[in-house]
């Protein structure tokens, strides 16, 4: 589990989601995070926010 840099975490989660066609739930389970953490990181941390 990686708790450090939120931007780095968002990139890893985003890459996992794209490469595996994963849902937020699946990515959360794979990385040991809550669904809300995955969603927050991917959407708000230089991710899809404002798209």
Image (tube, rainbow, N blue to C red):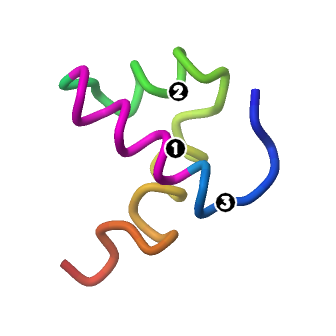
Relative image position of residue 17 (x, y in whole percent): 31, 33
Q: CA distance from mark 1 to mark 3?
A: 10 Å
N-terminal of the pair, mark 1 or mark 3, is 3
Q: CA distance from mark 2 to mark 1?
A: 6 Å
Relative image position of residue 48 (x, y in whole percent): 29, 68
Residue that carries the numbered disc 2 in the rendered image: 28
Per the rendered image, the range of residues in magenta is 10-20
- What is the quadrant of the N terminus in the image? top right
Position of residue 14 relative to residue 49, above or below, is above
Residue 7 is a magenta residue: no
Front residue of 27/11: it is 11
Query: What kind of element bears circle 3?
Result: helix
Query: What kind of element bears circle 2?
Result: helix
Relative image position of residue 27 (x, y in whole percent): 44, 26
Position of residue 2 relative to residue 7, above or below, is above
Residue that carries the numbered disc 1 in the rendered image: 38
Query: Would residue 36 be found to the left or right of residue 23 on screen?
Result: right
Task: Identify the residue at horizontal 62%, vertical 33% (top origin).
Answer: 34
Mark 2 vs mark 3, foreground winner is 3
Residue that carries the numbered disc 3 in the rendered image: 6
Question: What is the quadrant of residue 29 in the picture?
Answer: top right
């Amino acid at each position: 589990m990686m708790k450090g840099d939120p931007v780095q975490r968002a990139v890893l989660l985003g890459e996992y989601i794209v490469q595996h066609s994963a849902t937020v739930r699946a990515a959360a389970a794979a990385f040991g995070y809550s669904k809300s953490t995955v969603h927050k990181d991917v959407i708000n941390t230089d991710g899809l926010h404002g798209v």
